[in-house]
Amino acid sequence: MAAPDEHRIDVRLLVLAAISAILLALPLVFTGRYYLRVLTQMSFFIVFASAFGLLFGRTNQLFLCIAALAGISAYTSGLLTSRLGMEHWSTILLGSIFSAGVAAGLSYVANVRRMGVVFVAILTLAFQLIFENLVTGLVWLTGGDTGFRPPPLPLGPLGSLLGEQMSFYLIAAVLAIGTLFVNYWLMERSKWGLIMEAVRNEEVASEVIGINVRRVKVTVSALSGFMIGLAGALYGYFNGLISPIYFSFASIDILSQVMAVFGGRGTVIGPLIGSAVFTYVNENIRYLGPISLSVYGALIVVLFAAFREGMVATLRRWTRLVF
Amino acid sequence: MVEAALDLLLSQLPVVLVDGITFGLQLALVAVGITMIFGQAQILNLSHGEFAVIAAITSALLIPLLGVPLAVLAGIALAVAFGAFVYKVVLLPAFRLQGENRILLGLFLMLGLYLLLHGYFTNQFPTTYLSIRPEVQTVELLGMSFRFSAVLAAGISAVLLALLAVFLKTTMTGKAIRAVSQNETGSMLVGITVDRIRLLTFLIGGALAGSAGIMRGLAATMGPESGIELTVLALLISVVGGVRSVPGTVVAGLMLGIVYMVASFLVGTYLSVVIMLAVTIAVLVLRPQGLLGESE
C-alpha cells in the first residue's frame, strides 16, 4: 500500500537501510569460513523466499517450482560457460532471462486457462519434477545425479582483495538487499502494490475497474523468475557444483515456503525474518539427517494451521499494543 | 539401434503391457482416492501415497508374526484408521475455512504431513520392503507365460475398482457420496450428513491406497520411499482423468501405466517420467476437466 503519510514512508526506508547495513556488517561479527557460508546461504534464501512470498502472497499464484526456476538459470549459465566457454556474467544474465521467460510462460498458461490455485500448484509441481528428472536423465549433458563443476566465477579485484568466500557473501548480500528494495518499491511505493492488492482480493472486480489481471500476474511472475534466476545461477557458482540435489523441491522450495510463511508472505521484510530464523534452525537440525524433513513437515502443518498471518503481522499487533 | 530396440519391444510387448496394466491399476487405486477426496472436501491430498506406505510397511513388519493374510489386513486397517485421523484431526483447521482458503490450507497441511511421514518412514524403516511372493510363479495365457503375482495383483485391483464403481452407482451411501461431490449445500438440504460422508470417503481412500501399497508389494516391491512416486503419478492420473470423475481416473490410470512401462523400456525411467509429466501438462492445458470429465 502506498501510504499517504510521508513520515511513515521515511521510517520504513530507514529500517530497510539499517537492515542493509546490518547485513553487510554481519561478517565482522560472525567471522570464520563456516559462518560466512551459512550467511551466504541465508542471503540467497532471502531472494528465494521473497520471490515465493511475492508470487503467492501478492498475486495468489502458488509456484511450487522455485527450485526449478533457480536451476534453469544455474544449468543454463553453467553449461554455457563450461561447454561453450562463454563469459560468466553474460550467461548469468541470459540464464535469469530464461528463468523469467519460463515463469512468465507458466503464469500465462495458467491465466489463459483460468486455472484455480490448486491447478497452478499441480502445473508448477509437474514442471518442477520435469526439471528434476530431465537434468538427472540427460547424463551426457548435465552429468546426471552427480552434476558437473562449472568453471569458477571470476571475481576480479574483489576476489583478490577480500577472498573468494567474502566476495560471494557480498554478492549474495547485495542481491538480497536489492530484492528487499525492489519489493519495497513494488509493494509499498508504486501503483503496483495497490493493483496487486486488488487482484489478490477480487479478480473479477479488478477486471471491472480496468486492471489487466493477466498482465499483472505475468509481469510479477517474470520479475520474480528473474530474481530467482539471478540468485539461482550465483548459488550454483557458490556451491561449486551444479547438481539436481541443490535444485530439488526438498532443498529449495520447502525452505522458501517455510521462511516466507513464517515471516509473513507478501510482506517486504517477512522473508528476511524467516530466512534468518530458519537458516539458524536449519543449521541446528542438520545433524538429524533425513528426519529433519519430518521437522519441516511438522513446521508447515503448525505454521499454516496456527500462524498463517506470519511474523510481520504479529509484530505489528504487538507494537500496536505497546503504543 | 532404434530398430533393435523396437524388435526387442515387440517380442516383450505382452509382458510390458501386463506390467503396464498392473501398474496402471495400482495407480488408479491411489488416484480414485485422491479424486474422491478432492471432490468431497476440496483437499488435494499430497500425502495419499503415504497411506500405501503405511499399509505396506505395517504388513511387511507383521508378516513374520501373523502370516500374510492377517498382516495384510492389519496393514490396510491401519491405513483406514489413518484416513480417519487425517480427516478428524489434521484437517480440522482447514474445514473451519471456506472456498479458496480451505483449498490452500488443505494443500499445505497435506504437504507438511507428507514430509513428516516420508522423513519418519525413510529414517525409521530404511530397509523394510514389502515383497509378497506366492508359490505359483508363472501362468500360461495365450501361449505366453506371465508372472503370476503381477496377474494376481492386476486382478485384485480390477475387482476392487469394479466394487467401488458398483458401490458408488447402486447403494444409497454411494449415491450420497456422489451427491456431496456435486453439490455440498444441496446434499445437506436433502438430509445427507456431509461430515459422515466425508469421513467415509477418507476411510475408503485410505483402504484403496492401502490395498494399492499391498498390490505393489505383490507385483514388485514397496519400500518406505515409494510413497511420493505413487502420489505424483496418481495425481497426474487424477488430472488427466478429471479431478471429479472415477471412470475417467481408471481409464487414465491404465493409459499412463502402459505409457510409463513402454517408455521406461525404451528411454529409461527418468525420461519416461518427463514424458508422462509433459502429457499431463498438455492435458491440463488443453482439457482442464480431464479426458472423460464433464465440462462445467
Image (cartoon, rainbow, N blue to C red):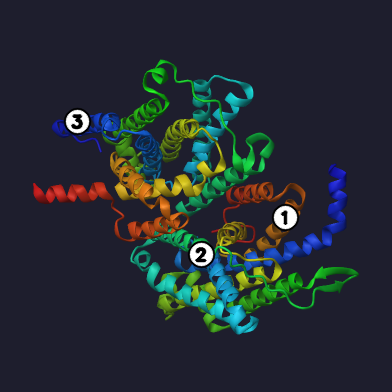
In the image, B39 versus B48, the foreground residue is B48
The local crowd at label 1, few if under 14, some if 14 to 19, many if 20 or more residues have their Cα within 10 Å, is: many
Kindly indicate the quadrant of the structure image that contains residue B169. bottom right
* Mark count: 3
- The subunit carrying tag 2 is B
Cα separation between marks 3 and 1: 58 Å
Q: Residue at position x 39%, y 40% from top?
A: A45
Question: What amino acid is found at the position of numbered circle 1 in the picture?
Answer: Val
Disc 2: which residue: B121
Disc 1: which residue: B259
Q: Tell me if residue A87 comes above or below residue B113 in the rendering.
A: above
Q: Position of residue B146 (x, y in %)?
A: 82, 69
Cα separation between marks 1 and 2: 30 Å
The local crowd at label 3, few if under 14, some if 14 to 19, many if 20 or more residues have their Cα within 10 Å, is: few
Cα separation between marks 3 and 2: 48 Å
Kindly indicate the quadrant of the structure image that contains residue B10. bottom right
**Are callouts 1 and 2 both on one chain?**
yes
Residue A264 in view of the camera: no
Disc 3: which residue: A14
A25 relative position to B195: left or right: left
Q: For numbered disc 2, what is the local secondary structure?
A: helix
Q: For numbered disc 3, what is the local secondary structure?
A: helix
Q: Residue at position x 76%, y 72% from top?
A: B151
